[in-house]
Image (spheres, helix red, strand yellow):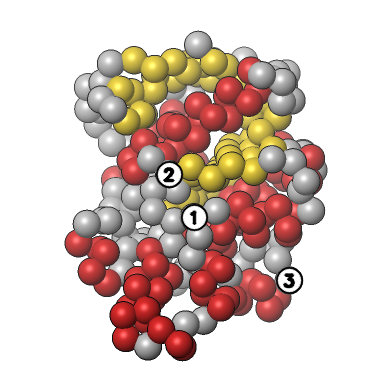
Amino acid sequence: MLSAAVEGIGYWSRGLPDWTAARAFALGETEADSEAAPARPSPQLLAANERRRAPETVAVALEVALAACHAAGRDPATLSSVFASSHGDIQITDYMCATLATEPRTISPTRFHNSVHNAAAGYWTIGAGAMRPATAISALEASFAQGLIEALTQIATGEDAVLLVGYDGGAYGPLAEVAHSRGLLGAALVLSRARAGAPVLRAWLDEPAAAATPGRLAQREAANASAPMLPLFEALAWRHDRVALPAGAGRSLRIELSHD
């Protein structure tokens, strides 16, 4: 069993631009107006030119990462980080494949360097000035659970605190037929060894869990590839004590939450 305190939470989806709004929505206290909301965040960690050029997946990952650090009162430059995404940026992957197949000499160097799966982790370390290790993980629907295992393992083996970020954007082109994802979603946690007053999570691998009734966040973002992480955030909103996330290979990651 691995454990950590939840020091800070970040969240963004269209119409729910932060954890305060997402928590209120999850609890049924407010509604979300996605039509009038920005289609993507504008992460202040990046300079204006970089914000405009950064892919939407990078934008949402950095937005929630910085929000979680601020909520925890942690300097982003001091934290090791884990970035978990099912697909990375499919829009850029679709562009790369189409361009290589038709006009390979016109491929954009900027889009080329944004096509790698660890693009968000790279932007984060540069923007935050972080010299700590940064890990990028992909495990389809188990991506966030595997990212959480990695973050908890780092804490168990000596890290004082770790930033965990889950994010995915929409699927485009022929890849959308096999890599299903719509919308833009990101959420982040700052986890640490211990912090007075912070919720504590304990996690262990187990047999598959029975399907649970999805909460409001999970229903709203069900089409996004990172939606499997949302039961944990709804449990944090409701102060529930148990939840399970898909962990791959027919296993689930059982999580027990305690709130002081």
Residue 246: horizontal and vertical position, in percent? 33, 30
Is residue 36 or residue 234 the one in the foreground?
234
Splitting the image into 4 quarters, where does residue 158 fall? top right
Q: Earlier in the sequence, mark 2 or mark 3?
A: 3
Q: Is residue 179 above or below residue 256?
A: below
- Give the residue at mark 2: 138
* Residue 155 visible to the viewer: yes
Q: Is residue 227 left or right of residue 194?
A: left
Is residue 69 or residue 55 the one in the foreground?
55
Residue 258: horizontal and vertical position, in percent? 54, 15
User: Could you tell me how far apart the alpha carbons at marks 1 and 3 are, in whole angstroms?
Assistant: 22 Å
Q: Which mark is residue 47?
A: 3
Q: Is residue 49 left or right of residue 147?
A: right
Q: What's the residue at 73%, 59% (across, down)?
A: 127
Q: Is residue 141 above or below residue 12?
A: above
Categorize mark 3 by other alpha carbons within 10 Å: few (<14), some (14-19), many (20+): few
Q: What's the residue at 43%, 62% (across, down)?
A: 89
Q: Nearer the viewer, mark 1 or mark 3?
A: 1
